[in-house]
Amino acid sequence: MARLAEYADARELTWNLTLRELRGRYKRSVLGWTWSLLNPLSTVLVFSVVFKFFLKIEPPVGDPSGLHNFALFLLCGLVAWNYLSNGMNASMDSLVSNRNLIEKVYFPREILVVSTVMSLLVSLLIELAVLAVILLIVGNMVIPWIPIALVVVAIQTLFVLGIGLLLSVLNVYFRDVKHLMAIVLQALFYSAPIVYPMSLVPEKADLFGWVIPLRTIYELNPLVTLVETYRDVLYDLRFPPVGDVAYLLAWSVGVFAVGLWVFNRLDGRLAEEV
Amino acid sequence: MSAGSAIVVDDVSKRFRLYHERNRSLKAAFLRGRRARYEEFWALSDVSLEVADGATFGLIGENGSGKSTLLKCMAKILRPEKGSITSRGRISALLELGAGFHPELSGRENVFLNGSILGLSKRQVTQRFDEIVDFAGLEHFIDTPVKNYSSGMYVRLGFSVAINVDPDILLVDEVLAVGDADFQRKCMEKFADLKAKGNTIVLVSHGLESVRNLCDEAAHLEHGQLRRLGPAADVVDDYLGAVYAGGQRQDGDHGMRWGSGEARLERLELLDASDQPVKRTRTGDSVTFRLHYAAEERIEAPVFGMALHTIEGMHVTGPNTRDSSGIPKEIDGGGFVDLRVDRLLLVPGTYDLTAAIYDSTLTHPFDYRYRAFRFDVEPGDPREEHGVMSLGGFWTAGTPTH
C-alpha cells in the first residue's frame, strides 16, 4: 500500500521526466519537433518507392476498406513495431543513463522506465496521427476507428512497460543484455507479419522429415497478434477478433506483472550496482 | 516508533559487495558459475538510533565509518540487509546539488524538473520560483541552457532549489560545504532558518565545529558501528579524544605520505607554552610546532615546510625555512626544527598540519606528510569565530575632536 501511495505522489515527477525526455530530444536541431512528423513521413516515402519499384510484394486488399497499398500496409504494422523496439531499447538505457539520480535521490525507480515509455508513447501518437491523415487522404475513413486504436495502444503500452521494467533492471546487472537484445530484436522483427503479409506463412512446414504446424506455432507469437490487430483497425477498418484482443491483453498483463515483480525484487541494490 | 521521533533506525546492518571481477557479462556469469566472486563488507552493523522531531542531528566519523551509508539508508537510496528505518514526514536528501539537471534545458525548466525530483509539486515550485532564482542570483541567466553555466552558477542554482524544498526531514551530506565562503555563509544561515522553523535535519559532516554549533545530538560511527550517541558537544569531544588517543594519527586517515626517504619526518608535535605536547590549544596561545626528523645521510641546506589546513580543506598558511633565513644549514642524523608562534591567531576549529622536508631547490621532496597531525583550537583571546584567522587587533572608540 505504501508503494501505491508513492506511485501516486510520483505522478508529477513522472510527467516532468517525460517532458525532460521530450524537450531534450530535439534540442539543438533546427527543425525541432518537425522531426517527429518528418520521421514517419520519410518512412512512408522510402517504403513507397522501394515497394513500388523494387520489391513487388502484393499487399492484401483491405477488408472491408478496399485499401490496396503496400506502404500503408507496412506502416500500420511498423508503428506498432517501432513502439515496441524503441521502448525496449530506451528502457534498457533508462536506469544506467540516470545513474546520478539513482545514486543521489530517492523516488520509485520504476518512474525512470515509465517516463521513458511515456515519451515514446507521445511519439507513437504523433506517428499515428500522421498515419491517420495519410489514410484519410487515400480514402480510408479511419476517424471512427481511432478510439479502438487507442485501446490497442493502451494494451501495447502495458506490454512495453512490462518488458521495459524487466530489461532495464537486468541490464544493470548484466550489461550485455543490451547486445543480446539487438539480436533478439532482429529476429523478432521477422517473426511477425510486418514487411510481409501473413498469407506468405505456410500452414505446414517440413523440418527434417517432421511435418510441423508452422502457422499455428507462428500465431502463438503475441507480436503477430499485435501487428494483425493494428492492421484490423487501421488498414482493414474492422473490429479485431475478441479472442485476439483477449490474447493480447493476457500477454500484456502477464508481462507487466512479471516485469514489475522482477523489478521490485532487484531494485533494492540499484544504487550500488548501477 | 515513539511519539517524538522523526526517524527511528532500528538495528540496521548494510552489506556491500566488493567485486573482484564483476560479472557484467552473461558469459562470465555462466563460465564462473552463477555467482561473481566478491567479498562481503559490512558498512553498517547493528546501528540503532532515534532522531527526535525537530532536532538537528549530526553524524560524525572517519572516512569509511559508514556515516554516508547510514544517511543514504535513511534516504531510502540504499536498502539495509537487516533492521529497519522508519520515518515520519517527507524526507528530502541533499546528496548532490543539481542532480538531474538536463544540460540542454534552460535554468527555468531545470528548476521545475529538479524541484519535482526533490518532491515539490509544480504549484509549490511556482510559488518559490522567484525566491529560488533570487537566492541563486541568476535572474539574467534563467532562460539560458544550464550547459552554458559556470560550475559555480550550476551549484548555486542546485543549492537554491534544494534548500527551498522545505521538507519535514532534511538529510544533508557535507557536499554542501563546497563553494566559496559567501556561499557557505548563505548555506549556514539557511540551515539556521530551517532549524528555527522546526524542521528535522540530519547532517553528515567532517566539520566538527559545525556539528558542535549546529547540532543538538550527534552519533559517532566507527567501522560501521555506533560508538557513541548523545548531546553533540559530548560526542564531538569524545570523538576528538578517540582520534588522538591512538597517538598522533601519524598514519591516520589523512596520512598520505610520499618522498624519497633520505630524510624522514619522524614525528610532528604541537607544544604549549611550557613545551608540553598537546592536541588542543586556544586562540591567542603561545605554541610551537615541532618537526622531528631523522636523516640517513648528510643533507645540505634542506628546507622544512609546513602547511595548515582547516578541516574543510582550506589552506590557511604555509611557512617554510627557506623563506626565513634557511635553518638548519645541514642535517645528519636526528633532530628537530621548531616553528615558534607567539600568538596563534587561528579562530576556533579543527586544523590539520602538513609537514615536509625538501632539498634546497624545493623540487625534490625527501618526505612529505600530508595532513598528518590534527589539532583543535578552542575559544581564547581574542574571542573571535568568523573566517579562519584573527588579526589580533584591538577595538577602541572615540569621538571627533571638533
Image: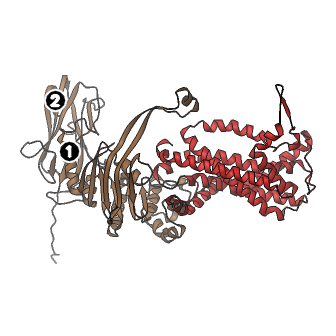
Chain colours: A red, B brown
Q: Quadrant of residue B233?
A: bottom left
On screen, residue A235 versus residue B236, left or right, reads: right
Residue carrying label 2: B329
Mark seen at residue B223: none
- Report whether B298 appears left or right of B45: left
Q: CA distance from mark 2 to mark 1?
A: 39 Å
Q: Secondary structure at mark 1?
A: helix
The percent position of residue B361, horizontal first and vertical second, equals: 27, 30
Q: Nearer the viewer, residue A90 or B39?
A: B39
**Residue at image point 41% right, 47% down:** B80
Up/down of B129 relative to B389, above or below: below
Q: Which mark is on residue B242?
A: 1
Labels 2 and 1 within one chain: yes
Whether residue B143 can be seen here: no
- Three-letter code for the amino acid on which mark 2 is drawn: Lys
**Residue B219 appears at what percent x and percent y?**
28, 52
Output the chain of dot 1.
B
Where on the picture, by quarter, is residue A30? bottom right
Please give the chain letter of the residue carrying mark 2: B
Q: Amino acid at mark 1?
A: Ala
Q: Secondary structure at mark 2?
A: loop
Q: Which of the 4 image quadrants contains residue B306?
A: top left
| Category of crowding for the residue at label 1, using alpha-carbon neighbours closer than 10 angstroms: few (below 14), some (14–19), many (at least 20) | few
In the rendered structure, the answer to whether residue B162 lies left or right of residue B361 reads right
Please give the count of numbered marks on the rendered protein. Answer: 2
Of the image marks 2 and 1, the number of the one nearer the N terminus: 1
Q: Position of residue B169 (x, y in %)?
A: 39, 62
Do the residues bearing badges 2 and 1 touch, measured as CB atoms within 8 Å?
no
View extreme (left): residue: B274
Viewer-nearest residue: B294 or B99: B99
